[in-house]
Every structure is written in C-alpha cells, then in structure tokens.
Image: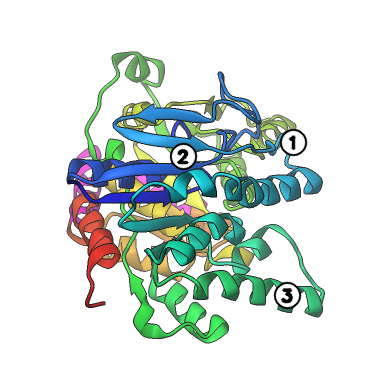
Amino acid sequence: MNKKILVVSQRFWPENNQINDICEGFIERGYDVDVLCGQPNYPSGEFYKGYSSFKPGREEHRRMNIYRTMEIKKNNYSSLRMFLNYVTFPIASMFKKAALRKNDYDRIFIYQQSPVMMSLAGLSIGRSRRILTTMFVQDVWPERLYDELDVKSYVFNRFLTRLSAWHYRRANRLIVTSEAAKSYLIREMNIPAGSIHCIPQFPYRVMEKDMRSEELMERYAGSFNIMFIGDITNEYSFDTILEAARRIDRHAIRDIRFIIVGDGLNLKDLKVRVNKLNLHDYFFYEEHVPAGRLGRFASIADVLIACTPMDRANSLVQYHLVANYMAAGKPLVLAMGTGPKRMIRAAGCGLASEPDDADGLYENIMRMYRTPKAELREMGRKGRKYQREHFGRDNCIDQILDVIYDEKL
C-alpha cells in the first residue's frame, strides 16, 4: 500500500504555483496525494472559468484527489476583499476536517503562503490524528504582510507575531528556502533550530526546457527583447524599469522592447504609466499565459529583467524568480538586493545594480545590448548550469520527502 500525504495549500492547480510541481513529484515517486485547497482566483482576483466561491468541491487532477473549500475571491484587491479572502480559507477548511480525518494519511504537508492562518486545518488534523506535520514556509509571517501593509501599531504587531509563532510552533517540522528565513524564525519566533530545515526553491519545470515558437519569434523579430516573467505586483519595482526605459528613449534607441509576460494587481496601473510617459512603443504585454507556455516566451528573450524596490530588497520571493530566470538559460539584468546579486555573480550569468537604481539598470541594459549574441548565450548557459547544480527540481523534492518522512530528524 502506497504512503499517503495530505497536502494543504490555499493556492493550487490550475493556478501557476510551485506546489503543483511538488505534488507531481510526490506522485512520480509513488506516493498517494490528497490536496486541500481553495478556489482558483490568483493573480487576477477573479475566479477561473468553471469555478465559483462554492464549486467545485471535489476534483481529480493527475491522480491527485482535490478537496476545494469555499473561498471569497480577491476581486479588486481592496483591503476588505483581501481580509475576507485571508479569513475564509482557514475557516472553510476546518469544515472539511471531518471528511479528511477519515482518510488514512501517513503525513501532512502544508505549503504555507499568505496568510499563515491557511495552515490551520492541516495543523488541526495532524494534532488530532497524531500525524507528523511538515510546513514548507514560503511567506514568512508577519514579515510578508508588512510587505503589503504599513502596520505601525505596536500592539497589533505583537499580536501578529504571536499569531504566526502559534502556527509555526504547532508544526513538527519546518522547511524554509533560505538561511535568512531560518534565522528570523529562530530569533523572532523562538523556534528550535533543529526543527527547521533549509531547502532552496527550485524553478518551474517548464522553464528548464528549451521551447521554440515560430509565431513568437516572428512577432518579436528585429529587436533586442528584454522580458519580465512573473506577477505584476508591488513585489517588483516597475518604476525602476520605466525610468531606465525613459533614458533609452532619450537616447533615441528604437530597437529595444520590454515584453511583460504575466498578470496581476498592478498591470492596469503599469499600462497607464507607460502611456503617460509616452513609452508605449517600447512596452508589449502578454497576459494570461498558461504555465506550460512560459518557456516559449523565455526562448525569444535576449535578457530577462527584474527589480525590487529598496524597502523590499531582502524579500524572499525574489529568490524563486531568479531561480526561474536562471533555469530559462538567458542572461539576467537585475536591480535587486544582496542575495540575488551574489547568485548571478557566482554563476556569471548577468549584471546587477542596487534596488531603485534606474541609472545603474540603464547602464547594465546598454552593456547587454552591446554584447555579442554568442556571449549572451554563454551567460545563459552558465546560469542554467548553476541552477541545476544548486537547486534542481528532483534533488529538492527528494530533500523535501526526506524531511517529511525521516523518523530520525
């Protein structure tokens, strides 16, 4: 009889999320997987076609049983909508607890994104059934919340810290993606160091494959293509990219294109600002791209770009984006914090400037623009090699399963 894992993650297929790949890795290795999740509405805030607040309640996908809870969509990402979305999944998931408790699980695996409360049902089932529970911490709370909200109340800060610590301490084991996250949990949450295991995030599988699209190559032929692939949110500084584009425009360089691949809360605002600055000849948008087609877009990029604002220079989210970029086998141009800069310098796969440094970003773009194509290809090759050696998918999934199942840890 196969070992059986209950995976708890508010976000899951058909949303584009790394937990999809982790679960498929479990299936490939012979494990049975049930998934407790919400209704898909990220990143646009609208439900995907065929989904609503209450339906469907059950699905099957690639030999996985999916249990979906009621969820209030984020819609326009107003503070009220965000709050309602944050609280509905933890509450609604508890109503699935009775049905899930009947299943014979060996382990519980919680993929913890925002909010930290989304782990509630998994922790509760684990405690009541005495099942070893592992939490993979993606969004370190309450720090991740502070990226979105300016919380100045000392009392509320203390409440959020204690709420987060309560959840983290109830997992038997924690997995984090960086030593910085591990240090934070030890220092701020008083979590024993021995229960925290560091495993890097691996890129999406589709980014590791060379894919060609004749239609895309024809559409974007004849220009130097600078591409962003990801969610259009406050996590990334498009102001810095726009300022660099303004400098390119002032120097009358007309064969550079910025291709924005993705969707998100700030996409509409980005388009408005591009038009206001009269940069519409430089910017092109590819929205609602299925995860399986991302590699086709990466294939027509000359370089991949990403910037973070200074107040989020140490955000942990950026590491995953950089890993995905390296996997695509393309050079990188970044305006980011110390960690990603060290990564690309160690790999020799790109150029990096400080967050919010539009002048530095512009200079690095122009250096790439003047670099021979053969040298750009070699940079991309080095990045992919570094990614495979340090955070390849299969190795990371094996490490995750070791933490989940090793009785000696």
- Three-letter amino acid code at the position of disc 3: Phe
Q: Nearer the viewer, residue 126 or 60?
A: 126
Name the residue: 82% across, 74% down: 153
**Which x, y percent locates residue 366?**
43, 47
State the SS at label 2: loop
- Three-letter amino acid code at the position of disc 1: Asn
If you read the primary sequence from the N terminus, does the residue marked by circle 2 or circle 1 appear first? 2
25 lies above or below 342: above
Residue that label 1 marks: 76
Residue that label 3 marks: 159
385 vs 102, left or right, is: left
Name the residue: 18% across, 44% down: 30
99 lies above or below 221: below
Residue that label 2 marks: 12
Q: Nearer the viewer, residue 179 or 321?
A: 179
Q: Is residue 380 magenta?
A: yes
Q: Which residues are magenta?
A: 362-388
Find the distance from the CA under tag 2 to the CA under tag 1.
20 Å
**Quadrant in which residue 135 is drawn:** bottom left
